[in-house]
Image: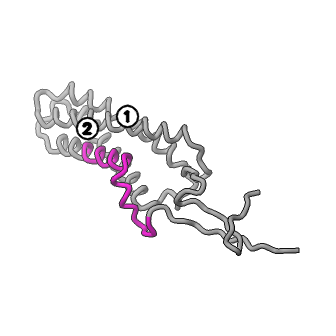
């Protein structure tokens, strides 16, 4: 009777480091950076403007812009430092899909309110324009996350399974030949 030893090796996806700097040059990474920049500009325009014609509309705009700026920053850092794999109990693609759904709607509403209530104050008009730009970028990110989430099967961690690709787990016998899957 022959015995075989099965060892499991993991091939790291992009580098061995803790930081995934290549993410910033991907389309989702650039979209997140664009959203962060647009939201930061919109928030600062509203925050630094004097003489708000409608205090409630611009408070709402400020809160929505700041909230989604912080949420986007958290998602960006999660991808940058590869933290999704360390928190497998959360379905990250679905979480981001819901974030972009709610964010696009709320930022669109806040931008419409800001555009209507700007009263000729140029900083507030610029803030509403950057709110609309953020809405467009979030809609694009929503569409891409929708197509990714609903097109490929996911594992229980929420990360995509790519057989024999970078980052996949492969089993080999002691003599170096691939182990057959049962």
Q: Secondary structure at mark 2?
A: helix
- Residue for point 27% across, 43% down: 39
**Image quadrant for the N terminus?**
bottom right
Q: Position of residue 175 (x, y in %)?
A: 70, 74
- Residue for point 48% across, 37% down: 146
CA gap, disc 1 and disc 2: 23 Å
Q: Residues within 10 Å of mark 2 (few under 14, many from 20)?
A: some
Q: Nearer the viewer, residue 38 or 152?
A: 152
Q: Would residue 16 appear left or right of 21 to someone viewing this image?
A: right
Q: Position of residue 103 (x, y in %)?
A: 38, 38
Q: Position of residue 147 (x, y in %)?
A: 49, 37
Q: Would residue 142 appear left or right of 45 to someone viewing this image?
A: right
**Image quadrant for the C terminus?**
bottom right
Q: Is residue 181 above or below residue 112?
A: below
Label 1–label 2 contact, CB within 8 A: no
Residue pointed to by mark 2:
59
Q: Is residue 27 above or below residue 137?
A: below
The magenta segment: 15-39
Q: Earlier in the sequence, mark 1 or mark 2?
A: 2
Residue pointed to by mark 1:
139
Q: Residues within 10 Å of mark 1 (few under 14, many from 20)?
A: some
Q: Secondary structure at mark 1?
A: helix
Residue 170 in which image quadrant? bottom right
Which mark identifies residue 117?
Answer: none
């Amino acid at each position: 009777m022959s015995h075989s030893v099965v060892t499991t090796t993991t091939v790291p996806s992009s580098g061995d480091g803790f930081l995934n700097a290549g993410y910033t040059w991907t389309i989702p990474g650039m979209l997140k950076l664009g959203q962060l920049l647009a939201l930061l500009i919109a928030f600062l325009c509203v925050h630094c403007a004097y003489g708000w014609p409608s205090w409630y509309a611009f408070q709402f705009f400020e809160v929505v812009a700041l909230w989604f700026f912080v949420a986007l920053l958290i998602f960006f850092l999660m991808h940058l430092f590869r933290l999704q794999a360390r928190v497998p109990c959360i379905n990250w693609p679905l979480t981001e899909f819901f974030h972009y759904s709610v964010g696009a709607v709320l930022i669109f509403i806040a931008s419409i309110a800001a555009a209507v209530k700007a009263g000729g104050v140029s900083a507030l008009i610029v803030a509403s324009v950057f709110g609309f730009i953020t809405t467009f970028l979030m809609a694009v990110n929503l569409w891409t996350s929708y197509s990714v989430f609903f097109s490929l099967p996911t594992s229980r961690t929420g990360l995509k399974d790519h057989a024999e690709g970078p980052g996949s787990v492969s089993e080999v016998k002691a003599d170096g030949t691939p182990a057959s899957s049962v």
